[in-house]
Image: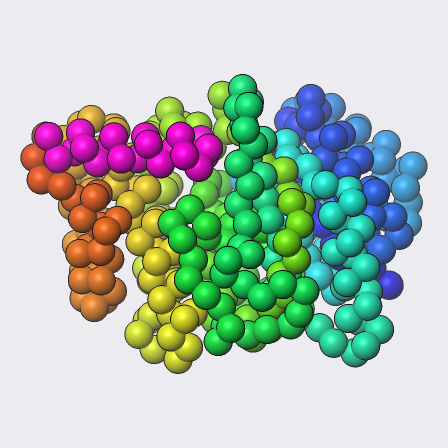
């Protein structure tokens, strides 16, 4: 019996993956640690095999051709046998004491014949050079240490959204809703978090600083230069979210509002990155993206476009675009992302 399957997608991760693996192994036999080697050309696979040999009852290695982060997550989910499923990126890690507390609750709920669709815990921006490590928590939004539904959820602040770092899904829920992330695409963690939400009926939040999100490598997908270079993939993911649901048909109002606000964040980030690209082509793509949302669902378009984020991302003229970027830069300093 494995209570929690943890997939660690690895691509040329030899320099840092062991920190992630060691932190997860602190969970002991309750953990199924799935190391997915995504076609690495360095010694990633050798390191993974060494851990598999040393911990044969805990570690599984999936060796596959390169398909990108999302495809590696797919492979981890296909292999998973644990009751719950978690993704930990190979350059991140988890707090060991928090992991043990989460496993204790999962075990207790299982013994009581209870299960939840989604576990949530806090995550910490481990940003290189930052003296203050920003913690994203949900204690002002979610009931703590109890099973609850979307009806009990409060109002999420900007910058307080559920990310892959904070979420643990029930494995069977992900498989039943047929979650499948696209290959060779960055930023698919947004799909991973967003797509299962309407299938979630029960939630459990623990106010623990569990996930440590490392920010600081030049080759990270969230590095602004890389986001500009890969802006078409950001647009693709945003359009995928737009196409995913007719949001007005989601019956629970709080969930519906949350998903609209999440989409607003995606539209804003895509817009600002396009503005930062500083080309006429990028500005055309920005207009096309907003037209795409408008054509898909005018009500959602109107709510996002004329909300605070939508207005900030669409200030007119060169001066307006400068103000939009300035607001983005202030937000980046406040929340510590990329």
Q: Could you tell me residue 276's position as x and y percent?
A: 25, 29
Outermost residue toward the front?
140
Q: Main secondary structure of the magenta part?
A: helix
Residue at 46% across, 52% down: 161
Q: How many marks?
A: 0
Image quarter where the N terminus lies is: bottom right
Residue 101 to residue 320: above or below: below
Q: Could you tell me residue 297's position as x and y percent?
A: 23, 66
Please give left or right for residue 134 compared with residue 33 in the image: left
Please give left or right for residue 154 compared with residue 330 in the image: right
- Among the 4 quarters of the image, the one containing residue 20: top right
- Among the 4 quarters of the image, the one containing residue 256: bottom left
Q: Is residue 328 rendered magenta in the image?
A: yes
Residue at 56% across, 32% down: 133
Q: Could you tell me residue 258's position as x and y percent?
A: 40, 63
Residue at 61% across, 57% down: 120
Outermost residue toward the left?
317
Whether residue 315 is visible, yes or no, is: yes
For this rendering, which residue is in front, 230 or 256?
Answer: 256
Q: Which residues are magenta?
A: 319-338
């Amino acid at each position: 019996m494995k209570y929690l399957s943890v997939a660690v997608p690895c691509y040329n991760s030899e320099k840092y993956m062991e920190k992630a693996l060691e932190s997860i192994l602190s969970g002991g036999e309750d953990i199924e640690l799935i190391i997915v080697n995504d076609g690495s050309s360095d010694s990633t696979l050798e390191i993974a095999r060494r851990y598999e040999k040393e911990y044969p009852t805990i570690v599984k290695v999936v060796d596959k051709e390169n398909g990108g982060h999302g495809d590696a997550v797919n492979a981890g989910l296909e292999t998973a046998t644990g009751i719950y499923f978690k993704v930990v990126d190979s350059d991140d890690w988890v707090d060991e004491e928090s992991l043990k507390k989460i496993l204790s609750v999962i075990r207790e709920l299982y013994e009581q014949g209870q299960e939840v669709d989604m576990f949530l815990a806090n995550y910490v921006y481990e940003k290189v050079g930052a003296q203050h490590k920003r913690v994203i928590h949900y204690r002002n939004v979610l009931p703590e240490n109890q099973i609850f539904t979307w009806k009990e959820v409060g109002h999420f602040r900007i910058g307080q959204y559920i990310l892959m770092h904070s979420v643990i899904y029930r494995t069977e829920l992900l498989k039943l809703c047929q979650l499948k992330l696209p290959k060779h695409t960055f930023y698919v963690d947004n799909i991973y978090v967003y797509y299962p939400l309407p299938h979630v009926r029960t939630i459990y939040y623990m106010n623990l600083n569990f996930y440590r999100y490392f920010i600081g490598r030049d080759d990270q997908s969230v590095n602004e230069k890389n986001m500009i270079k890969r802006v078409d993939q950001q647009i693709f993911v945003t359009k995928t979210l737009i196409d995913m649901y007719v949001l007005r048909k989601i019956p629970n109002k709080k969930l519906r509002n949350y998903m609209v606000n999440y989409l607003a964040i995606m539209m804003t980030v895509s817009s600002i990155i396009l503005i930062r690209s500083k080309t006429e082509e990028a500005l055309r793509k920005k207009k096309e993206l907003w037209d795409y949302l408008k054509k898909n669902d005018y009500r959602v378009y109107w709510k996002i476009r004329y909300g605070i984020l939508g207005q900030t991302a669409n200030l007119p003229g060169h001066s307006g675009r400068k103000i939009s970027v300035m607001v983005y830069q202030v937000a980046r300093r406040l929340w510590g992302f990329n």
